[in-house]
Image: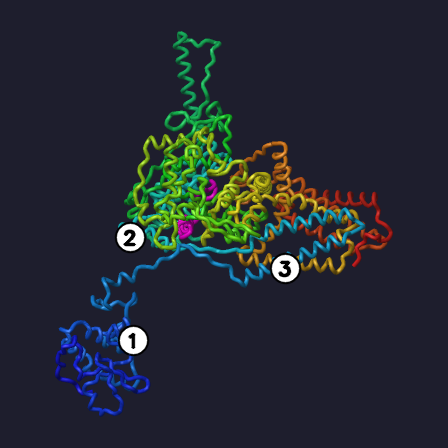
Amino acid sequence: MPKSSNSPPKSSSGGRPPQGVKFTRRTSSGRLVNLSRDEDMDMSGESGQNDYINYTVMMPPTPDNQPGTSDNQPGTTRFASESQRQGMNNSDGGGSKMDRRMSILNSSNNKSMLLRSQTQDFDHNRWLFETKGTYGIGNAFWQDDPNSFDDNGMSMSDFMDKPWKPLTRKIQIPGAILSPYRLLIGVRMIVLAFFLSWRVRNPNYDAMWLWGISIVCELWFAFSWLLDVLPKLNPINRSADLVALHDKFDQPSPSNPTGRSDLPSLDVFVSTADPEKEPPLVTANTILSILGVDYPIEKVSCYISDDGGAILTFEAMAEAVKFAEVWVPFCRKHNIEPRNPDAYFSIKKDPTKNKKRPDFVKDRRWMKREYDEFKVRINGLPDVIKKRSKMYNTREEKKEKQLLKEKNGGVIPPDQTIDVPKATWMADGTHWPGTWYNSTADHAKGDHAGILQVMSKVPDHDPVMGYADEKRLDFTGVDIRVPMFAYVSREKRPGYDHNKKAGAMNAMVRASAILSNGPFILNLDCDHYIYNSHALKEGMCFMLDRGGDRVCYIQFPQRFEGIDPSDRYANHNTVFFDGNMRALDGLQGPMYVGTGCMFRRYALYGFEPPRFIEHTGVFGRVKTKINRNPNQARLHVDDDQEPLTSDAEMDLPQKFGNSSMFTDTIPIAEFQARPLADHKSVKNGRPPGALLTPRPPLDAPTVAEAIAVISCWYEDKTEWGDRIGWIYGSVTEDVVTGYRMHNRGWRSIYCITKRDAFRGTAPINLTDRLHQVLRWATGSVEIFFSKNNAIFASRRLKFLQRIAYLNVGIYPFTSIFLVVYVFIPAMSLFSGQFIVQGLDVAFLTYLLLITVSLTLISLLEVRWSGIGLEEWWRNEQFWVIGGTSAHLVAVIQGLLKVIAGIEISFTLTTKSAGDDVDDIYADLYLVKWTSLFIMPLTIIIVNLVALIMGFLRTVYSVIPQWNKFMGSTFFSFWVLSHMYPFAKGLMGRRGRVPTIVYVWSGLLSITIALLWISIDPPTDSGGTGDIQI
């Protein structure tokens, strides 16, 4: 193309190029299309080459250079080439812009580029570089041109803002696992129906009593299996997004310019009752893990409820708070996990992994020494308290003697006795207001004053950075604040029903509302510590996500330490926590299991959710969505303008007690628990930045009011324990409390974190384990005979959720049928009869189909729940052991309580280890006799004797019926295989059972078998009751 030496003259028509210069492009058909503002010219072969070669500029067919020259022409797009935009700016600058355009096009490089474009060989990347072409508008590239794209004040920052993201998401179980699982459940239901029908229609006329017993048991087992498996039809997984939580609540924004945390406050409850069975060192480690949690420090408050009022627990907590002043900053400085010092220093793996600070090894060595000294101080507290009390009591006795001498002229009368109470003294020289070692009136476990001691004050609102200290660690740049901690021991007096743990928890609810009023409450047992410091934030994701205002609590799975590797007694309980609970999360939510649960305080107060669904029709298929406030829904009033506590029918003083300071905290807790209103899909939200104000410091009147609400008379004529807080009337108050919330329309969430959220201990001793199961089963029987039975549930409870709660109350009654059924093999061997007339093809086919379908269902359940096959088998074994011992006793005790009004008392499970300190599994081998052993031991002995007797009967028969013997033997071995862990537990430590015990057992079994054969000798030929194949 010839170069043009003269710049084109200005035009009067808006600065566009003169008509002598045309901008064109070549189409795929070879036709040249005009790109200038003039009308298209026919550039076909009719015109000569000189007509356009000196004046026509060939534009490459790039995405930025498309036909269209004005906003009102068809084909015009928002994106234009740089040359087009410059040509359309204004009429005055047309000439200069044309000069720049022509200078670019006249370069030799662009000439070669244009030549390549005319030959359809175009280098797009080189064109973008040489002509400064752009990609358009977006967050990948932005051109700093105020007139670009005719925008109004837009900049790159407008595109860099992150889009709205949910805090959680639901992860469905793969259809390749779930669909066959559901199909097999349906198939097994059909097979069971046909099998039971066949069993009813084909009785064993030679042994009708045996046939009738087996039929009744099998019908119940089928019903029990349905109650257990139906709620498992819709398991799901969930995940939380901690990055999105950080972006929403902890990042600077127009409503939060300083970037302070906008997360709601959280109160953590820890409960203990007896320092002898719940060692203070274990409780102190749990408290330390809470104080070091990864959550805004000023928004965490920790409370411990000491229901025994023990000075040992009180002083152990004081030592723990003092140690936390160095332990908590150490955890923050080096990102320690877990933040339980005992668990951390017991980790077997390399502690330096992923640690990069050069002073870590020195700091860890110093902290380990400090912790060892802390443990020694805790272990020495009992002796210190007793010596101190003895010293003060001796001093008081001397004072009394001196006063008596002064009154009687320096002589103590012989008939005068000095009566000085043996008090328990605190370190400051005052009487301990709680329980004394030598119990007296006003100082006993069931008779003492209320105690509330704030041991760690409300932390400053601003971070307090540490400094280098020669005597301590270098905490430079580390926030050294510690969350607030308070010791609570409610008042107890004779004549009041204190309602065990549920009453203690409700007292803490009221006291915490006065002191901190966290809208969310996390409750932990004293032996369950925080293993994952980020777990509270993961739980908060579900509470603060859209729809989170309908969530009453977040239940975390229970994980245990110190369990024997084989998990002999199914202490991990993974089938329940990873199977049943995960499946309930797909319905209305998991049950509350007593610990590791984050509550919405507003839901604990007995209020209904802002929205709920009523289920009617067959199986609850008809759903009706209901807003809690009909007037509000009808008037379309915004939730932020109409608080949920504006119900005119609510009489606060009558329901919650006579503390106006407490009732004033209720609407505040409700508002602070709302999700962030940062999206139109979020209902009942709060504005961003509403929780940035600092907490006021505690004053004397506030603490005095908190002490008043933990008095023993406060709950009189209120609804505490009936509708509000933890529900009274059952030893399993946890299940009842969760059921009441679900029954009001709330839902719950199951939060399984990648790293275990909490870890605790479980009794590995057989006796302790059975007593624990006995307490759970007794509570279930109480639920069945109370108004909390799921049969009477409201329409707000989903159908399958109702089935799950119904199973909670019914499962202990299965023990009656189970005990009878496990004796059937022995009865068959003793009597020479069987449950069916003969082992025909139909019976064996049904048995095979039922077994195969159950096996496949179990394998698929193992797949979607993530549990191990051995764990599933251990659970099956202990189901039989517990069902024939603890569950049976629970049914008897429950019936006695309902019929005769006999109350059942339970003792705490000991958390301490066995006598052998060198073996962490010492408790596993301890044999502590209990009446719960009688029935399982009888089952084992009877089945062993029956096997020997059946074998001898068959051998000495004229016509041995080995098929009959093998049929009964199979079922007998099925029973004994389930009883194997129980038998192993009775043997104690391996090698400690003398051999003579086995010899005596064998001789006894053979003697009884021979005696039975002598009394009832076998017949010479098989009778009509013989089993034939």
Q: Does residue 625 lie above or below 376 as drawn?
A: below
The residues bearing labels 1 and 2 have C-alpha atoms spaced at a distance of: 43 Å
Q: Position of residue 144 (x, y in %)?
A: 22, 67
Amino acid residing under circle 1: Gly
Of 733 and 311, the residue lying toward us:
733
Front label number (3 vs 1): 1
Q: Position of residue 37 (x, y in %)?
A: 21, 79
Residue in the picture at 76% in, 57% down: 839
| 1 or 2: tag closer to the N-terminus | 1
Q: Are marks 3 and 1 in contact (CB under 8 Å)?
A: no
Task: Give the residue pinned by disc 3.
Answer: 187
Task: Give the residue pinned by disc 1.
Answer: 75
Q: Tell me if mark 3 has few (under 14), some (14-19) or many (20+) residues whose alpha carbon lies within 10 angstroms of its own.
A: some
Amino acid residing under circle 2: Pro
| 3 or 1: tag closer to the N-terminus | 1
Element type where label 2 sits in the image:
loop
The residues bearing labels 3 and 2 have C-alpha atoms spaced at a distance of: 57 Å
Front label number (1 vs 2): 1
**Left or right: residue 696 compared with residue 88:** right
Q: Tell me if mark 1 has few (under 14), some (14-19) or many (20+) residues whose alpha carbon lies within 10 angstroms of its own.
A: few
Residue span colored magenta:
521-548
Task: Give the residue pinned by disc 2.
Answer: 252
Instruction: Point out which mark residue 446 bears.
Output: none
Quadrant containing the N terminus in the rendered view: bottom left
Q: How many marks?
A: 3
The residues bearing labels 3 and 1 have C-alpha atoms spaced at a distance of: 62 Å
Residue in the picture at 13% in, 84% down: 5
Q: Position of residue 480 (x, y in %)?
A: 32, 43
The verdict on residue 532 being magenta is: yes
- Does any portion of residue 925 appear in the rendered image? no
